[in-house]
Image (tube, coloured by chain):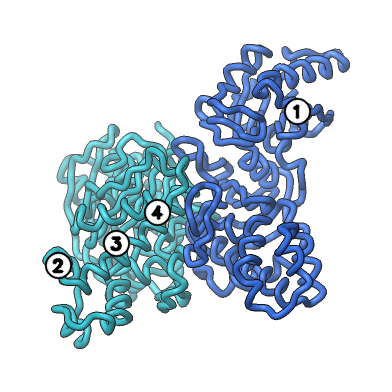
Chain colours: A cyan, B blue
């Protein structure tokens, strides 16, 4: 068996997979972030122990566990350098702690990386060795897979697609402290930035009251864009333009067969992806772009635990 | 023994390495691009055969050959999709042809990729698993190494760093047919583009006659910038700004320990690299940039054959 955990700020998604990576159990437990999240790993451990016992199994029947967390992970040591959503303020040695609790080998990675790996192995990129995934939500996350393996980089900080510099001219401050990041123009935060900057150029828009009182939601922008509201259409187009530039650079750098778009904003479907594709085709380096498709993610919020199971099969020797 | 060839438009650099990748022979032959370059591989083969015989050796003593060519290579098949500098107009099955000539296994890759691998294995990135190399010359070439292996992508068109979209606002047409490419602002071509666009903003400059008669050279720009000419300084600064943005995105995407700058323009040394570093530090995503150094290449024109030898040791099983 292979165990998989995707630890998020609200829930921990847990799964048990068989040796052929077929999911045999799937459940979740709430994430208790009190006391600086000090009980999270223990709770995950206890839940696995109980679920395994219910099936007459134990940790001894498991090859290992894959664990995804929302923070920057040093993949070689399995240490996360803090995770704000889990209330982990300091570096946490997840691999070490979970191995001590369970006695089995743990492989730890960033949750967005594991979502990319899940989509590559079981979702929109099934069977392809080279893919890029972008997750468009409050911010922009991502993961890069080259030759079937995640690109981790020297400190595990690779795949930070939201911090590509595509929009320096807009001059929006990003959460990272910098300016020009893809996240600052192609996320819920990005739509708000663009709306504040450009709404004055439009005489009237159903968005204006939402912009003024700070309640603007991405879904409102997309819904009104589909209904023909000029400001909403302008915002979706601007966001698509920057995603077109970003994906063009990604194609030139890693030449993926698929660029997979997931996250809450991707629910806008072809209304968004069609525009992104048009800018991609306009800007992308032709030899690298050839054969690169821009496609929606398929696994939704399940991508992470699929990736967590997959990475165990990649990094723990078959017994 | 391991054989290595770096086939360029003027010369073919050839080398013999021992099993520990120490270079034991190094010579070159002219590249004959006549008759659509149809004799190039045969000439390389004959030269290796003769050099081996002079040492009392033969192909039977060789584990394989690495071959670099200036064009887009499908790494899995060893086919280059044309190479303008070699007068190869159509796709050429280099791996297949050289294996038929020599009887030994050939590994074929793009020359800029092999230069990156050479620098990673023996030069400025020695011993590091994650590096990026940029070659600044007439254009901008590059290679990306993640986890000790070159990123090839799905059609071998990865690492085209010159075609990252960093300068869409400048609106210079690139050789690739697109606009906004790093190559269009950070190469000899790029300096010419910037000079033509901005020289009118400067009352006088020693560069102006060169810009007007089309004879502007990169070395002239750097020399006069060092002497304080305002237009020349402006051009070096603009180029550095765009290199700072490009390297910032590369750090966020692949989190390398070193970004290695080579090619003719890198001879400007810290006068250029210091400015690139300053913009990199201003823009780069802090966690990914941490520990990333921007350093000059060390192997110059030799990087390619070192990379050609290295890739044989990576992709041909030890016997």
Mark 1 secondary-structure assignment = loop
Residue A110 shows in the view: yes
The answer to which quarter of the image holds residue A46 is: bottom left
Residue B146 shows in the view: no
Do callouts 1 and 3 mark residues in contact (Cβ within 8 Å)?
A: no
Front position among marks 4 and 3: 4
Horizontal side, residue A18 vs residue B155: left or right? left
From the viewer's side, name the closer residue of B93 and A140.
B93
The quadrant of the rendering that contains the C terminus of chain A is top left
Do callouts 4 and 3 mark residues in contact (Cβ within 8 Å)?
A: no
Horizontal side, residue A102 vs residue A75: left or right? left
How dense is the environment of label 4, judged by Cα within 10 Å: few (below 14), some, or many (20 and up)? many
Horizontal side, residue A242 vs residue A48: left or right? right
- At x 47%, y 49%, the residue is A151
**Circle number at residue B31:** 1
Q: Of the residues under marks 3 and 2, which one precedes in the sequence?
A: 3
Front position among marks 3 and 2: 2
- At x 30%, y 67%, the residue is A187
Q: Give the CA separation, mark 4 to mark 2.
A: 26 Å
How dense is the environment of label 3, judged by Cα within 10 Å: few (below 14), some, or many (20 and up)? many
The residue tagged 2 is A228
The answer to which quarter of the image holds residue A186 is: bottom left
The quadrant of the rendering that contains the N terminus of chain A is top left
The residue tagged 4 is A247
The residue tagged 3 is A136
Specify whether disc 1 shares its chain with disc 3: no
From the viewer's side, name the closer residue of A76 and A147.
A147
């Amino acid at each position: 068996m292979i165990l998989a955990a995707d630890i998020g700020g609200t829930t921990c998604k847990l799964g048990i997979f068989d040796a052929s990576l077929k999911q045999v159990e799937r459940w979740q437990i709430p994430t208790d972030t009190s006391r600086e999240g000090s009980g999270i790993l223990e709770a995950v451990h206890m839940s696995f122990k109980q679920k395994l016992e219910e099936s007459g199994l134990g940790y001894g029947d498991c090859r290992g566990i894959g664990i995804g967390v929302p923070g920057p992970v040093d993949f070689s040591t399995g240490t996360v350098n803090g995770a704000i959503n889990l209330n982990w303020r300091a570096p946490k040695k997840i691999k070490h702690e979970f191995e001590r609790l369970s006695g089995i080998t743990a492989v730890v990675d960033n949750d967005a990386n594991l979502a990319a790996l899940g989509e590559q192995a079981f979702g929109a990129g099934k069977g392809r060795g080279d893919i890029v995934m972008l997750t468009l939500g409050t911010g922009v996350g991502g993961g890069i897979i080259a030759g079937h393996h995640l690109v981790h980089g020297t400190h595990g900080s690779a795949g930070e697609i939201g911090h590509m510099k595509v929009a320096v001219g807009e001059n929006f401050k990003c959460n990272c402290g910098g300016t020009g990041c893809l996240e600052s123009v192609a996320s819920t935060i990005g739509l708000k930035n663009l709306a504040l900057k450009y709404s004055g150029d439009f005489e009237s828009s159903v968005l204006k009251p939402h912009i003024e009182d700070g309640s603007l939601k991405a879904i409102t922008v997309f819904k009104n864009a589909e209904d023909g509201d000029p400001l909403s259409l302008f915002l979706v187009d601007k966001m698509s333009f920057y995603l077109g530039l970003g994906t063009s650079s990604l194609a030139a750098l890693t030449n993926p067969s698929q660029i997979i778009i997931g996250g809450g904003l991707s629910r806008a479907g072809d209304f968004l992806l069609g525009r992104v594709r048009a800018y991609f085709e306009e800007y992308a380096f032709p030899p690298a772009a050839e054969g690169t498709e821009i496609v929606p993610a398929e696994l939704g919020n399940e991508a992470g635990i699929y990736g967590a199971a997959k990475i165990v099969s990649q990094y723990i020797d078959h017994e």
